Image (cartoon, grey):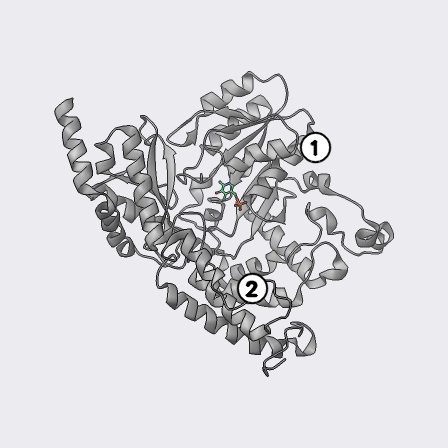
Amino acid sequence: MADSTPEAGSLAGGAEGHRRLAELIPVALRAFADGTAERGGPAPAGGPATVAASLAAADAPLLPREGVGATRALEGLSRLLAAGSVDPAETWCAAHLHCPPLAVAVAADVVASAVNPSMDSWDQAPAASEIEREFAGGIAALCYPGAAAPDAVVTTGGTESNMLGLLLAREREPGVVPVCGRNAHHSVARAAWLLGLPAPVVVDCAGDRLLPGALDTALAGLPGPAVVVATAGTTNTGEIDPLPAVAEVCRARGARLHVDAAYGGMALCSPALRHLLDGLDRADSIALDMHKFGWQPISAGLFVAREAADLSALTVRAEYLNADDDTEAGLPDLLGRSIRTSRRPDAFRMAVTLRALGTDGMGALVAHCRDTAAAVAAAIGEHPALRLWGAPTLSTVLFRPVAADHLDAGAGDELVAGVRRALLEAGTAVIGRATLPPRAGGPERLWLKLTLLHPSATPADYAPLLDVVAAAVPVREAGVRAGQSTVGS
Ligand SMILES: *Cc1c(COP(=O)(O)O)cnc(C)c1O
């Protein structure tokens, strides 16, 4: 190879691996910095066509016959990736439960990737499996402070955790029927589909929260066993189902309860917010994501069971990974701790992060986001051109331009959707959307959504964004049509 930089075939591990990494990582970081500067904002301007064109214009194809070498490949593609990415570390990138990862977690991930433990057998992950075991135990104790034998396993996220929640319910009671709120994440219905269970019975909500009375009625109408999925932090609004009342209905009706706390679960770390999750420990199982509140690179999911014994449903034997005689001789059996086989040591960076921050420090970051959301919501409430959906419970703020309310429903929603797309296309801001009735009740409308996960953003960072949204509304057109409809009515 012509250049003097490390050969593309060099290893990351072993006694010399760190030297190769010390040469390549600065190359990657420089390109990352250059690409980020080139983008110059929360999103690449120009939309899908522009991003596709910049890849098409790259100096080498992605699958060349002859390689370009490690330096060139890393430089070119790292720069392209950064320049063409949305960056949740930018405060105006706030559409989804898509967090900016903490530097400490990413640094830990470099070591994890270099060492490359695979979590399916002890002989591939001696220390990583011990760290995962202790970390999972700590998370289980956080979720179930009073339980005798809770346990947690690492998942790819809420989708897999919700699937495990339904799977364990099915293993206990084969005829089980899933029941969830209209506010439940789509992964609940998908899990039912995947597991061959009936489609979930969907229960009504008010203000994006499950109605316990409606749940009781639904359970009363079922001939057989049920597993209820409640949500602690909905994807649309961040609302939390009334967990104590839901748990009580489940107990009275003999239903199993899984709580999807993928979004809200880490509020357990905050003494100021923990009360929002009262009743969580009455669930049989919990989904929790640290790639939302938790500031981990994807993926960092946890599935927590009140009874460790429930997880035995995942037990499986594979002679080459957990032979009986190996297990009897004392080698921990890891295969039953996931439905996956090869598995990254995601617990490592979660553990490093929580060790660095402490649960108090983690809780303070969650509380910061929640306080920011409350202040942004207050600013929206006072903004003459914006209407607030309702005060946020976690860190999601929904609003829409008042101008959209002056149009008929379809045209108003089009206006809202158009604002979001215009800001995305320009690379100005990445804002989410949700269709739902106002918190106080009424017909469904399309809302703009800010999901605030930036752990150091301030309300002042968002004040200009509110003005940008208000200004992005084609005021003249909306004004004329609003005037017409007033005259006409
Ligand atoms: C994010 C989320 C999910 C899906 O989790 P993934 O980590 O994306 O698989 C499920 N439920 C809720 C409430 C969520 O917020």
Circle 1 residues within 10 Å: few <14, some 14–19, many ≥20: some
Q: Residue at x 20, y 37 (%)?
A: 478
Q: Is residue 406 left or right of residue 114?
A: left
Q: Position of residue 53 (x, y in %)?
A: 44, 58
Q: Say if 178 sits above or below 73 in the image.
A: above
Check residue 171 in the rendering and tell me which mark sits there, or answer none.
Answer: 1
Note whether ligand 1 is within 8 Å of mark 1: no
Observer able to see residue 238 = yes
| Residue 389 in sight here | no
SS of the residue under disc 2 = loop
Q: Closest to the observer: 2 or 474?
A: 2
Q: Quadrant of the C terminus?
A: top left
In the rendered structure, the answer to whether residue 123 lies left or right of residue 411 reads right
- The extreme bottom residue here reads 4
Nearest the camera: 31 or 205?
Answer: 31
Q: Quadrant of residue 206?
A: top left
Kindly identify which residue carries mark 2. 61
Viewer-proximal residue, 210 or 184? 184
Q: Is residue 188 above or below residue 36?
A: above
Q: Which amino acid lies under the numbered mark 1 shown in the image of this protein?
A: Glu
Q: Quadrant of the N terminus?
A: bottom right
Q: Secondary structure at mark 1?
A: helix
Q: Are marks 1 and 2 in contact (CB under 8 Å)?
A: no
Counting every numbered tag in the picture gives 2
Above or below, 315 relative to 184? below
